[in-house]
Image: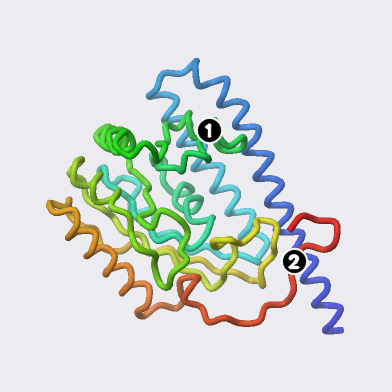
Amino acid sequence: MRSATRVLLVGYDYLVIYLALASLGIQCLAWSVLALILYPLLSETRGRALGRRFNMFAFRGYLASLALSRRFSFDIKDLDALRDAPPLIIAPNHPCLLDALMIFSRLPNVACILKAPLMNNVFLGAGARLARFIRNEPVRHMVHLAVRDVDSGSHLLLFPEGTRTTTCPVNPLSNSVGAIAHQAQVPVQTILIETDSRYLSKGWSVFRVAPMPIHYRVRLGRRFDPPQNTHRFMAELEHYFAHQLVQGSAFYPVNSLPAQPERNLDPPPGLPS
């Protein structure tokens, strides 16, 4: 009986992951087509507002569908306190691919700095351009656009690690967040993202299923004043993340979890890995 139950549960886990992935892909592709049409027709202000609002509702629906399966839980209500906050930089740690989606799902006016290849991605690029997301290169132009966006009243999402966490408890931070905060003279709101799974961490295939259930918690961290000395600020920020992600938490960042044998949940033969 236990063996049969386990087989059914593993099958259900596959169903949850693959249905959610398929629905997200179809939704993103459909929105990309529409965004391509709307981009030249709407003013920058209207396109930006529509693109960012769509992100909020679309990703909120996606996370809700995962939570409805009872195989994922998302404690992200703390983000609602930022909805009416003045312009600031939102700086989270980055354990997995769902981090940005969790933040977008609660906030209606968030710009994001994206890696250049993502701006050309068939699923994400057109929507990102409509929402006036910012390409991460060249750096000087990135900083200029980011400062202009914050000056317009937006929140700016920027992952200080630059990529998903690979070094416990946080990667070395890039100077971009300090440089933008210094030039725009806006505060930096830290976000602490915690999970009990390595699902969608660096190197994890989107088609690979993890042991479930999986829990995520997002906490508001310290809000730093606009920095006057960028290098000193970045050292303080890195120390803050390292300390907070290790101390007193019910969850732990992905890469601080002890290595444990996982049941084999790679895709069955015939499916991509």
Kindly identify which residue carries mark 1. Answer: 127
Can you tell which of label 1 and label 2 is closer to the viewer?
A: 2
Where is residue 6, by image quadrant?
Answer: bottom right
- Label 2 secondary element: loop
| Kind of residue indicated by mark 2 | Asp
Position of residue 105 relative to residue 219, above or below, is: above
Kindly identify which residue carries mark 2. Answer: 266
Q: Nearer the viewer, residue 156 or 87?
A: 156
The colour scheme of the drawn protein is rainbow
Q: How many marks?
A: 2
Position of residue 18 relative to residue 30, above or below, is: below
Instruction: Give percent across and percent down for residue 118.
Output: 52, 40
What residue lies at 60% left-to-right and 32% top-to-bottom? 31
**Which quadrant does the N terminus fall into?**
bottom right
Instruction: Give percent across and percent down for residue 222.
Output: 26, 63
What residue lies at 77% left-to-right and 55% top-to-bottom? 272
What residue lies at 27% left-to-right and 46% top-to-bottom? 88
Give the spatial CA distance, label 1 vs label 2: 31 Å
Instruction: Give percent across and percent down for residue 225.
Output: 17, 54
| Kind of residue indicated by mark 1 | Gly
The disc label shown at residue 39, or none: none
Q: Using residue 140 as the reference point, say whether residue 212 is left or right of it.
A: right
Instruction: Give percent across and percent down for residue 138.
Output: 36, 36
What residue lies at 19% left-to-right and 59% top-to-bottom? 233
Q: Using residue 9 as the reference point, say whether residue 175 is left or right of it.
A: left
Position of residue 238 relative to residue 39, above or below, is: below
Where is residue 151, by image quadrant?
Answer: top left
